[in-house]
Amino acid sequence: MHLDSGNYKGTYKLIGGEICFDFTNTISWRETDHPHEWFDIEENLAQWAQITGILDCNQSRQLLHSTKDFNNELEQLKKTRLFLYNLFNSQITQGFISNDALHKLSLLTQKANSHQILSPSPSGYIWSWQQGIKPSELILFSVLKSASDVLTRGDLSRIKKCPSCQWLFLDTSKNKRRRWCTMEDCGNRHKVNAFNKRNKSK
């Protein structure tokens, strides 16, 4: 199951390690002159929500058929995506997040959490989403919950940004030495560029 890349030569991969990072990574090469928007078509949003496990097949179809407010809902998702990217980028580059950004995330997360209920599971009880939530809201709420979980439960020094493509990811390596989104893509590209640069200087 892949996202439609259109004329773009790259591919989308789930490399973030957390849903919130996979969400921000739906723009490739964000900080360049030629960023690629993966939510350029409705089907890609629905596909993304499926491959991340946020929506099931029926909910994904429902999302595509709810055309009445879809453009407004997509715009809200994109605004949240930019907000979360800036929030995490601030943590990565400056070592902190502004009080205003934290307050905004707190309010958004509170709204999301108000739609959760305790449900039985084989191992006890779990938080689950209420029935009847619109698919676009389920995407939004899931992303916000993921973002707040990352900030409150993990080692913030493990939140990183690929220096090449600007994708965000959670570094789960033992020594926290992961640098690239993937070694196969940006890592190898860096090695090739460094090799060519060395050869030109000879």
Image (tube, helix red, strand yellow):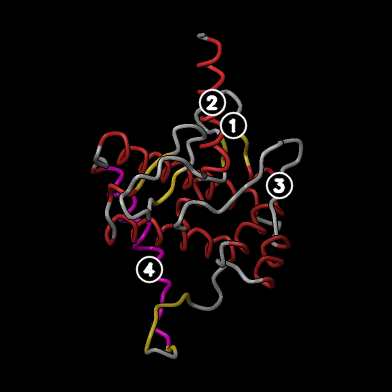
Label 4 environment density (alpha carbons within 10 Å; few <14, some 14–19, many ≥20): some
Q: Amino acid at mark 2?
A: Thr
Magenta segment:
100-119
**Mark 3 vs mark 2: in front:** 2
Position of 5 relative to 134 (above/below): above
Q: Secondary structure at mark 4?
A: helix
Lower position in the chain sequence, tag 3 or tag 2: 2
Position of 136 relative to 165 (above/below): below
Residue at 36% x, 60% y is 109
Q: Amino acid at mark 4?
A: Asn
| Label 3, label 2: how far apart the Cα atoms are | 21 Å
Residue found at the far top of this picture: 202
In percent of width and height, residue 95 lies at 24, 39
Decide if residue 63 is on the left or right side of residue 166: right
- Is the C-beta separation of discs 4 and 3 under 8 Å? no
Residue at 64% x, 48% y is 71
Q: Amino acid at mark 1?
A: Pro
Marker disc for residue 32: 2
Residue at 76% x, 36% y is 7
Q: Which residue is mark 1?
A: 35
Kindly report the secondary structure that dominates the magenta region of the rendered protein: helix
Q: Which residue is mark 3?
A: 41
- Is the C-beta separation of discs 3 and 2 under 8 Å? no
Q: Which residue is mark 4?
A: 113
Label 1 environment density (alpha carbons within 10 Å; few <14, some 14–19, many ≥20): few
| Label 1, label 3: how far apart the Cα atoms are | 15 Å
Q: Quadrant of the N terminus?
A: bottom right
Position of 50 relative to 72 (above/below): below
Lower position in the chain sequence, tag 1 or tag 3: 1
Decide if residue 165 is on the left or right side of residue 148: right
Residue at 37% x, 68% y is 113
